[in-house]
Image (cartoon, rainbow, N blue to C red):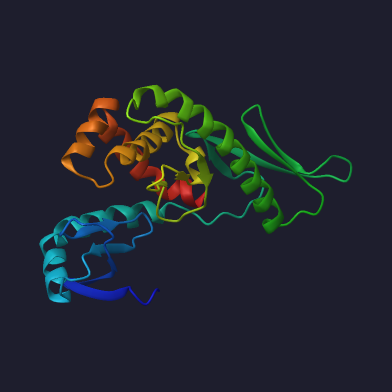
Amino acid sequence: MLSSEKQLSIFYGNDCIEFTRVPRVSDINRVLIKVYPDCRIVVNAPEASKDEDVIDAVKKRARWIYKRLYKFKAQLEHVMPRQYVSGETHYYLGKQYLLKVIPTTQQEQGVKLLRGKLEVFIKKNSTSGVKQLLDGWYKERAREVFSRRLDAVLPKAIWVKDEPKIRLQLMKTQWGSCSPSGLLTLNPSLVKAPRECIDYVIIHELCHIAEHNHSEKFYRLMKQVMPKWQAIKKNLDEMSGRYICS
């Protein structure tokens, strides 16, 4: 935990809800609460705000927070830790594929998507080895797919003058971010989600080029470019635990 972060908590009934307070890098003087699929709660608050005021703000949203936690915990119960062995299912573009691990001494190591299966050719079979090969394959696919999807949605983002560059970075709690200079950082695990979910995340970040905060103008822009974005976001939120953990 960074020195600028602080652990706080509230009680909702008999349950203790712990959260991390972090400084909000924004000129907006209000508290932003996020509940992540791994059940972490992060509260972005202006540095000048007192802890008591932040706690009061969290208490006002306690029912909403509790419902989100309940939902994510239920999802995580169905997410089994990956063993990276034949017979497991792994996601790619919203579909599930059977994993088939093939030890080989002749063929070059790598991953192939063939007839509904993800075939991993490996010389020395191990959990870490299969995972490394799969992670590399996902990253390669992500680079290609994200580039194509950016090209597809960019004409709708008429406020973007120059095509943004894409950087890949594994993240446990975010699908993407946009720097003030317009650099898009995308989570390669997003390539496991359907194309419409990938489009949603890219459009969301493109909208931040015009509006850096989640203002009313930001959401008007989102609706203008992707009218059904809320339903798509809901689908992504519901499956995020599986995409990130699979």
**In screen coordinates, is 226 left or right of 215?**
right
- Which quadrant would residue 67 be assigned to in this image? bottom left
Residue shown at the point (34%, 44%) measured from the top left: 238
**In screen coordinates, is 131 left or right of 125?**
left
Residue 201 in view: yes
Residue shown at the point (29%, 38%) measured from the top left: 210
223 versus 38 height, above or below: above
The image shows residue 21 at horizontal and vertical percentages of 27, 69
Q: Nearer the viewer, residue 206 or 77?
A: 206
**In screen coordinates, is 197 left or right of 126?**
left
The image shows residue 230 at horizontal and vertical percentages of 26, 35
**In screen coordinates, is 6 left or right of 140?**
left
Residue shown at the point (34%, 27%) measured from the top left: 157
Q: Nearer the viewer, residue 201 or 218?
A: 218
162 versus 57 height, above or below: above
- Which quadrant would residue 229 be assigned to in this image? top left
Q: How many marks?
A: 0
The image shows residue 41 at horizontal and vertical percentages of 29, 63
The image shows residue 153 at horizontal and vertical percentages of 41, 26
Residue shown at the point (34%, 39%) measured from the top left: 209
Looking at this view, name the residue that lies furthest to the right: 106
Q: Nearer the viewer, residue 136 or 146?
A: 146
- Which quadrant would residue 4 be assigned to in this image? bottom left
Residue 226 in view: no
- Quadrant occupied by the N terminus: bottom left
Q: Nearer the viewer, residue 228 or 25?
A: 25
